[in-house]
Image (spheres, rainbow, N blue to C red):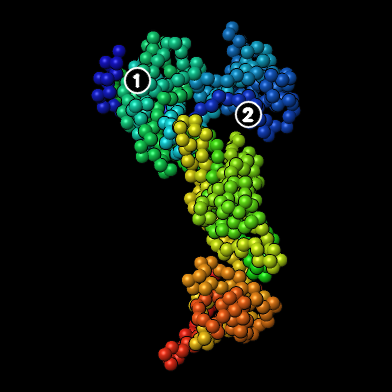
Amino acid sequence: MFKRTLLALAVSGVAVSANAATIYTKASSAVQADVEKAITANAKGVAGEALGADKVFNGAADDNCTALASALGVSLTNDDGAGGKYTVAASGKAGDKAAFAVVSGLNKNEVKMTNNGLCTASVKPGLSTSSVKDGLEYSSVKAIEIKPVIVAGIGGYKDEDTITVNLSGAKVDLTKTTAPTITVGNDGLSSAPANFSFDILDITAERVRFTVQTVNAKNDFVKGGAVLQLGGIFLDSKGLSSDTAVSVDSFATNTSGTDFDVASARVITTLVNQYTASVSSLLDAAIDVGKDRQEFATGTSDALVVAMKKNTDNLELTPAEVHYTITGDFSWMLDDDIDTNKDGKLSSAELGKAVKVAGLTNDAAKSYAVNTDLTKLTVVSTVTGAVDTSATITFTVPGHDEGKLENLMIPVQDFTVAVDVKDNKAFSTAAVNMPALSATNAGAWTLNGSVVIVPYMPFGPNTQPILRHTNAGTRTGDITVRYMVEDEHNAWQPLAAAGVKDAKPGVRNMLNIVTDALKAEGYDSEKSGFKVALEIVTNVPSRDVHVYGGAKVEVDGQDRIHLGTFKTNN
């Protein structure tokens, strides 16, 4: 039966473009409530309008069938089958009652009188020209099936016509596209659906061809305006990316080899990452040097807010978890108020005292974890239904301990955050990762004062150090000092005795107070030599503070002078 078709395809045809076919991305049956809303959008809701005062089908007999037909873009069909017409309400008058019906497989509305004062509105399917958005991550575990729609041109299709469907932007998966289909609803066919089939002629990586087969070539045909729903065409996952846009075009060829019903290409699907996240509020707390850097200037908490958007509207994975990965310096979480068992290992429960994810509707906090270097924090929330559009991750520090210096200091630091959504393993043994945000700036914690590092200062019997602190501004602020001794310390040690309360602007000799404080810690420069690094924190604007350091060292009867001027170093 295919012989004539195959021969015809070898003949060069002439394309016919007038009233040709059109490609759509989706067809959906008309919904009564939606049609009622559209028809009555500007109606006054009075008798004699298309749907009368009640604005619904199958309501009171206050409709007007002629006005209803006009609202649907057609003329009223009125034939009683006996050469006459049914009674219909006059223009602007009530008296008709309209019923609703769905048109299946035909792009045509109809309003038809069925009896005196009774009509039925048969409403065509809704046709979309907007491409669907399928998930790129979905395509990694499940083949993307495209379902384009062809609305036939004015001539429709007849027995042994060939319909060619071309793809661009992606390839057909030949291992899965083994039985593509064309389906046409009853209203798009001239006779019973059982009299029709759309047989596969051939399948390649770029196209699929069907042949129309009918029982009775004379009486069986696909109507002009018929809605042809395609299915069973799967995309090869190779080469798919977030830039992929898949287009479909089509044409028909009759048995004489003439091409007709040429439909221009339309983008059917675009592949997108299922989720995109962004930072809507940064971490931006100022560490208060006046509170020994154990608390923020605004209190004990700071929050990061992450917004989430779903990009897909068709084929997509079901989310199960959201993972927020935050980088920073989380050494402050080893404070005894957080690491309650003091084992240096932070459990999810312990971390929950320092960080919480909130602001959730469908999601719920599941777990918290930090790496051994205390530089990467992972916050996990479980998803019920849709992923929440916003999540607030709040950090809470132990706070100022009123000068006891037992609580750990908050490090100055920059943050990044990355967001990944995990699926529910519906199509795979391992959860599919849906990256929503690569590591991006999440804010910073800065100081509200000056921090100056003096990296080298020698002390000893043959050494005369120099240490001057200059506040060139107008504000008064406390000075605190920390130190490290070479070959002894690998972290800053508090030097509380070297602190100065309410230090006024001007030049201050810090040497004596630092020397005495070091002596109290067991480092007596009159007895032995040692080298220290100093951190000098001043609770005034950083731009105002300078530190001048140096030392005169006597070696083998010769004096050597080491000098340096130091500015803020965060």
**Quarter of the figure with the C terminus:** bottom right
Along the line of sight, the residue nearer the viewer: 372 or 377 = 372
Is residue 42 visible to the viewer in this orientation of the structure? Answer: yes
Q: Quadrant of residue 183?
A: top left
Q: Are marks 2 and 1 in contact (CB under 8 Å)?
A: no
Q: Amino acid at mark 1?
A: Ile
Total numbered labels placed on residues in the image: 2
Q: Amino acid at mark 2?
A: Asp
Vertical side of 436 occupied by 142: above or below: above
Mark 1 lies on a secondary structure that is: strand
Q: Which residue is mark 1?
A: 200
Q: Which residue is mark 2?
A: 34
Q: Residues within 10 Å of mark 1 (few under 14, many from 20)?
A: some
Vertical side of 148 occupied by 357: above or below: below
Vertical side of 390 occupied by 547: above or below: below
Is 553 left, or right, of 218 in this rendering?
right
Distance from Cα at disc 2 to Cα at disc 1: 37 Å
Which residue occupies 63% across, 13% down?
114
Is residue 146 visible to the viewer in this orientation of the structure? Answer: no
Along the line of sight, the residue nearer the viewer: 457 or 432 = 457
Image position, residue 360 (x, y; %): 64, 43
Which numbered disc flags the more N-terminal residue, 2 or 1? Answer: 2
Image position, residue 333 (x, y; %): 60, 56
